[in-house]
Image (tube, rainbow, N blue to C red):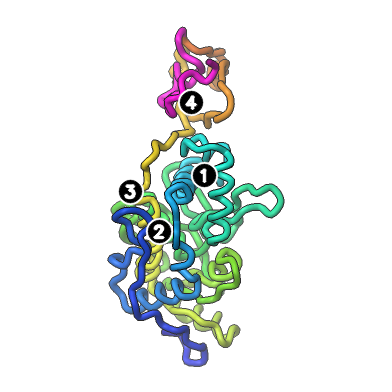
Amino acid sequence: MVATAQHSRPSENTGRSSVAIRPGVEMPDWSQISSPQAEAALGAILEIFHFDDCFRKFDATVDLVRCTLLTLYGELGRAPRSVEIAMAAGLEQDQIESALAALRRRDLVVLDEQSGAVKGAYPFTERETGHRIKFAGTTLNAMCAVDALGAGAMFASDCEIKSSCRQCGAPVSVTTADKGERLSAVVPQTSVVWNGIHYEGQAANSLCTVIAFFCSPAHLEQWLEAREGSKGFRLSVDEAMQVGKALFRPVLAESRKHRMIELNSTITCPECAAQTKEEMPTDSCLFFYECPDCRARLKPLTGDCCVFCSYGDVKCPPIQQGDGCCVA
């Protein structure tokens, strides 16, 4: 299971254990695993991560907050603020803070030590990791190579991954097809993934740091030679994608028991027809808006509370939430 004989072998988890995270949704999704090597790597991750403990008593509110957080991460291209999560999930601020604390204890989010702000939520991070995922109009940092490969299936969206060889720094790129379900192209074709197995309290600072792309098996071997005793599995990019899909494909499946709130709206200027995508505030109304093209000053039409409700393709968050006019 290890790339070279001199590296110790991680224990194998021979049972395909899983946890029901919501009715009809099992985590991980073992149906995505077809390779024995991918199965062994996933089993080792589950064992070292104490997976059963992580998802035991995973209540509906905590699940909703996690799903909302990740959905907003993809929409905004950044970690959402707690007020944005509360608005989108239809929950109170104290419920969000309690759920984020629970997710942190389970090592499913990374929070700022001082402010409590979200700094990461697997598979994404605000930190530069060298693994960039580009969706339609959004680019995000992935925690590691496996996380990057599983993110497209989580969002049911094709993506382009830009990374580099951990040994030599040469570019490695991956594109997906069929809404993130399969590989479309891998450049260079000789690329592999090292799925290291190392965990010390927080995956973002341990496990994720040893799961990386390499431009060739030879460069992986060179990297490992300098790290005698490293535990892990050499995977093809397809095998690593299997692991990523098994971990992340279930995350948003059948999760929207509460209506999700869209925070972006495209305003069409009635004077010049220019269209501009804007992020909507969650705690105030935008009553006036200046078109960046013709400089026309827009204000809401009679009966509307804000310019998004009058000229946007998506109504403002309070109207979406059914709370009525945000200035009432």
Among the 4 quarters of the image, the one containing residue 327: top right
Q: Main secondary structure of the magenta part?
A: loop
**Amino acid beneath label 2:** Phe
Between the C-alphas of marks 4 and 3, the distance is: 24 Å
The mark nearer the N terminus, 1 or 4, is 1
**Residue with the mark numbered 3:** 254
Gap between marks 2 and 4 measured at Cα:
30 Å
Residue picked out by circle 4: 318
Q: In the image, what residue type sits under mark 3?
A: Glu
Span colored in magenta = 302-328
Q: In the rendered structure, which disc, 2 or 4, sits on the residue that comes first in sequence?
A: 2
Q: Are marks 1 and 2 in contact (CB under 8 Å)?
A: no
Sequence order check, earlier mark of 3 and 1? 1
Residue 275 in view (yes/no)? no
Q: Which residue is mark 1?
A: 77
Residue 57 horizontal/vertical position (percent): 45, 59
Residue at x-position 56% and y-position 46%: 79
